[in-house]
């Protein structure tokens, strides 16, 4: 079954965290982002990567620039500002994309060929844009899930009367090691997420400025409605992950509360010293920094917007 994992697994089935990335990685492989491990297949796949990158990432911005140079007189102010919003975000527009090989004015056949080609190129850019907006959510949700699971394990420390003090201490050490593994996971994804969100913050400011000018001065009723939808969609690019970052900070605070409220009174000195060390580390929240300048949070998202 191709999409078996979209349904909740039964409690009797063992699942792994990496299962949450399967569909994301499939889409990344489809657009040329994740090469196979086999050497021969890597070279074949590399040609697909170059083609996808060339059409979706290079041709679209250059095609819009070419349309500005060759057909600037044909643009109305509203059309120019509308396409400029998308051009700034380094993706394309479905109309008025410059093609040096075919002129869509020369007959119906050329119009269909150019329109189909632009549609395929634009769909590739949409997939790239979708993946760049959603991969942060997938990684953030996986992180939150592990924090919640760790919280539940900490709450159950020293609650089983059949376990010895050494076994309780071993369980605490396993919690500390799992928290360390979570921090290593954050350290791995932090540089990539930091750059992605920082660029999105920069683009949102420029796009919103142009969109508002277009909305107030050059739009009629229906194009104004489309501009409002576009503004909302632009804001939604960063809002979900910023909200998740706030929830991650709350999860870290809940983790510290769970450690303090666990059944540690009456435990051995070794257990208490390890618990206090664990509590000290957990009190430092997990924070993602956009471009190494400002933290990614709801307040930052509102300030940029």
Image: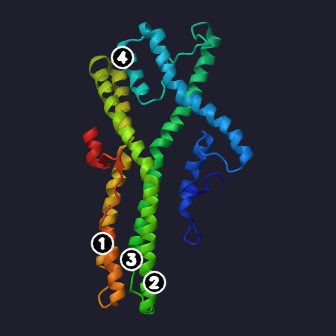
Can you identify the residue that label 4 sits on? 78
Q: Which residue is mark 3?
A: 154
Earlier residue among tags 1 and 3: 3
Marks 1/2 in contact by CB < 8 Å: the verdict is no
Q: Are marks 4 and 1 in contact (CB under 8 Å)?
A: no
Is residue 145 visible in the rendered image? The answer is no
Residue 280: which disc?
Answer: 1
Q: Is residue 86 left or right of residue 252?
A: right
Which residue occupies the foreground of this view, 116 or 100? Answer: 100
Give the distance between the C-alpha atoms of the residues marked 1 and 3, in whole angstroms.
15 Å
**Residue 200 in picture, x, y percent from top left:** 38, 38
Secondary structure under tag 4 reads helix
| Mark 2 or 3, closer to the camera | 2
Q: Are marks 1 and 3 in contact (CB under 8 Å)?
A: no
Drawn side of residue 121 relative to residue 280, left or right:
right
Q: Quadrant of the N terminus?
A: bottom right
**Secondary element at tag 2:** helix
Residue occupied by mark 2: 170
């Amino acid at each position: 079954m191709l999409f078996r994992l979209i349904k909740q697994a039964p409690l009797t089935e063992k699942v792994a965290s990496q299962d949450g990335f399967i569909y994301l990685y499939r889409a990344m492989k489809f657009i040329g982002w994740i090469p196979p491990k086999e050497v021969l297949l890597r070279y074949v796949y590399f040609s697909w990567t170059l083609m996808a990158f060339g059409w979706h990432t290079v041709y679209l911005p250059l095609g819009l620039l070419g349309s500005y140079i060759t057909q600037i007189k044909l643009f109305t102010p509203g059309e120019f500002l509308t396409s400029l919003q998308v051009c700034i975000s380094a993706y394309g527009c479905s109309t008025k994309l410059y093609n040096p090989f075919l002129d869509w004015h020369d007959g119906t056949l050329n119009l269909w060929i150019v329109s189909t080609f632009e549609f395929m190129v634009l769909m590739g850019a949409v997939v790239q844009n979708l993946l760049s907006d959603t991969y942060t959510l997938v990684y953030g949700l996986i992180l939150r899930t592990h924090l919640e699971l760790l919280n539940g394990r900490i709450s159950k420390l020293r609650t089983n009367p059949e376990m010895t003090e050494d076994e309780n201490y071993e369980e605490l050490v396993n919690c500390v090691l799992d928290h360390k593994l979570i921090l290593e996971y954050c350290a791995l994804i932090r540089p990539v997420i930091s750059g992605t969100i920082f660029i999105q913050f920069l683009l949102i400011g420029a796009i919103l400025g142009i969109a508002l000018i277009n909305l107030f001065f050059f739009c009629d009723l229906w194009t104004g409605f489309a501009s409002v939808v576009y503004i909302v969609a632009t804001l939604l690019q960063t809002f979900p992950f910023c909200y998740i970052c706030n929830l991650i900070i709350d999860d870290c605070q809940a983790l510290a509360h769970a450690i303090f409220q666990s059944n540690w009174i009456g435990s051995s000195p070794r257990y208490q010293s390890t618990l206090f060390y664990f509590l000290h580390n957990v009190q430092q929240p997990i924070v993602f920094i956009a471009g190494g300048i400002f933290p990614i949070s709801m307040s930052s998202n509102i300030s940029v917007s």
